[in-house]
Amino acid sequence: MSTKKTSQSEALFERSQRSIPGGVNSPVRAFKAVGRSPLFIKKAQGAWITDADGNSYIDYVGSWGPMILGHAHSAVIEAIREAAGAGTSYGAPTELEALIAEEIIAAVESIEKVRLVSSGTEAVMTAIRLARGFTGRDLIVKFEGCYHGHSDGLLVKAGSGLATLGTPDSAGIPADVARNTLVLPYNDPESLAKAFAEKGGDIACIIVEPIAGNMGCVPPQPEFLRAMRDLTTKHGSLLIFDEVITGFRVAYGGAQELLGIKPDLTCLGKIIGGGLPAAAVGGRADIMERLAPLGAVYQAGTLSGNPLAVTAGLTTLRLLKELNPYAELEQRAAKLEQGLRDAAGEVGVPATTNRVGSMLTAFFAEVPIVDWPTAKKSNTDQYAAFFRAMLDQGIYLAPSQFECAFVSYAHTEEIIEKTIKAAHAALREITA
Ligand code: HOZ
């Protein structure tokens, strides 16, 4: 039983279930994996979110990644307000789109041209079509536990909400589509080499989360990334980094800057929309120029490059460049990671923490978490109990073991300390 009053959230959940499948517009929000009904959110500010009953929580979901500056940053909100006054959508090009494209190109070394879309799913869909159009091949390689949005060919052994629900393959995907997706284990260069030795000439691309975030945070082993780059180059396939989570999160230039590997195409989302729906695919000019209207690979969108979304994204990117918060984010997230480890150690609960910069996951597991089979060894019941106890302590974590916690610039030292204290109390409670 929650110690907080949640009757408004419960009533809203009841009501939403009558008109929305499962009461939510994205499955993981339903809290199914953590054994309680979801909180309905009324507002958010800085590191805090407030639910419909007026309870405030320190938020580590951060809209699943975009809110790196914290919620409702005054400069972002002001810019959106001003942009809204000039109209909300034109379906025609704007200077803003060139500005954000230039910003992205300057930030991400491998990107020479960018196409803006509205969601990460769309960015990935476009990147895969481009890779197929460019190479004239059908087969794509993805990794078990990685999630790349909900387009047909990528919902095969996927992470995120699918992992949470225990249904890694969605119904409704034609077998003809699924057969063009080759799924390999994450962090396993040998399997990759074998797949390329057998089918290299048919593989259009590898798509990968260079730092996995959708089976919980799982860092890549350097030889895995190196093998990907070498094999795709050798076999004339393309390497696509899905940096929807990691772009502008782990470094201004994304995971590729941090890890020193240059993909051919990159998918961006989340942070580049500053909390509004914007995403992008970018990469080598010779590939990007295959997109219509220059080339034969078609992609379009009424709200692509939407002026409000681009304004929010551009303002966020410029602030990130100006503040350069990455060292501080690293330090605060490291403190949180150590605090969670200590809290688990205090009560003797086996836990493995994985972290890259400001994205982290505490797995309730005894083994190192390096891929989906090891992530799956986590004690998800224990995570659910921890999640509920943390909510009672005023901390809002991801409602699934297989997601990341995101630390934002608004998570001050004091907030981190409060969180660690809450984790000690929560773990004591669930192990008492
Ligand atoms: N795919 C997101 C988690 N990795 C969930 C999106 C949402 O529910 O908002």
Image (tube, grey):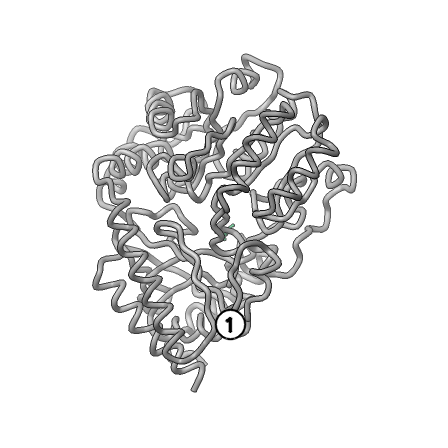
Please name the residue shown 57% across and 62% down the image: 17
**Quadrant of the rendered image containing residue 252:** top left
Residue 107 location (% of width, % of height): 34, 29
Q: Nearer the viewer, residue 2 or 128?
A: 128
Residue identifier under label 1: 36
Percent position (x, y) of residue 430? Answer: 44, 81
Q: Quadrant of the C terminus?
A: bottom left
Against 193, is 400 above or below?
A: below
| Quadrant (top left/top right/bottom left/bottom right) for the N terminus | bottom left
The residue depicted at 30 percent of the width and 35 percent of the height is 317
Give the residue drawn at x 47%, y 46%. 211
Whether 343 is drawn above or below 262: the answer is below
Residue 135, percent across and down?
65, 21
Instruction: Work out whether residue 52 can be spotted.
Output: yes
Residue depicted at 62% across the width and 31% down the height? 205
- Kindly identify the amino acid type of the residue bearing the numbered disc 1: Arg
Residue 95 position, x and y percent, is 33, 20
**170 sits left or right of 35 in the view:** right
From the viewer's perspective, is 67 left or right of 207? left
Q: Residues within 10 Å of mark 1 (few under 14, many from 20)?
A: some
